[in-house]
Amino acid sequence: TVHGPDGFVRRFAGTVVRAGQDDVAVPSVTAAAPAPGATTVAVLLANSGRTETSFTLAPNDFAGTTQTAWVAPGGSVTVNWPLDQGRYDLTVTAGTGTRFAQRYAGRLH
């Protein structure tokens, strides 16, 4: 877990998939900074493995409702997560059996 100013939090948990192992789902998450004045942040959910997996995005605080997205092998899906006066706080989990969880929180100015 990494903490910074203005409510910045990044938390990464779960079992690491060995390099080169792709016979299972291999989830990854990237959050892109939005353009000034935007009301959402783009969360890219990717799966570089060879089995489909589900991602669940859940709010911890501020705006947003729980969402589930399925990502095909080798695919990706973008989810637009709402900002609440520039603030966001969500946890992303993946249904891989590896306890994959990532938390993203902070404030965009």
Image (cartoon, grey):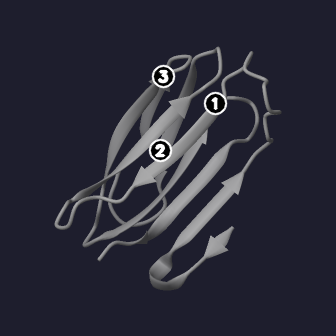
Q: Is residue 81 left or right of residue 55?
A: left
Marked residue nearer the N-terminal end (3 or 1): 3
**Amino acid type, label 3:** Gly
Please give the label number shown on residue 95: 1
Which residue position holds label 3? 75
Residue at point 74% right, 30% down?
A: 97
**Percent x, y of residue 36:** 20, 67
Residue at point 52% right, 32% down?
A: 46
Q: Is residue 19 above or below residue 89?
A: above
Disc 1 secondary structure class: loop
Disc 2 secondary structure class: strand
> How many tags in the picture?
3
- Distance from Cα at disc 3 to Cα at disc 1: 15 Å
Other residues around mark 2 within 10 Å, as few (<14) / some (14–19) / many (≥20) = many
Please give the label number shown on residue 42: none
- Distance from Cα at disc 2 to Cα at disc 1: 12 Å
Q: 70 or 45, which is in the foreground? A: 45
Which residue position holds label 2? 57
Name the residue at the front extreme: 20
Q: Is residue 80 above or below residue 63?
A: above
Q: Nearer the viewer, mark 2 or mark 3?
A: 3
Q: Is residue 40 visible?
A: yes
**Percent x, y of residue 41:** 32, 55
Q: Quadrant of residue 103?
A: bottom right
Marked residue nearer the N-terminal end (2 or 1): 2
Which quadrant of the rendered structure holds the N terminus?
bottom right
Q: Quadrant of residue 98?
A: top right
Q: Is residue 79 above or below residue 60?
A: above
Other residues around mark 3 within 10 Å, as few (<14) / some (14–19) / many (≥20) = some
Q: Nearer the viewer, mark 3 or mark 1?
A: 3
Q: 49 or 93, which is in the foreground? A: 49
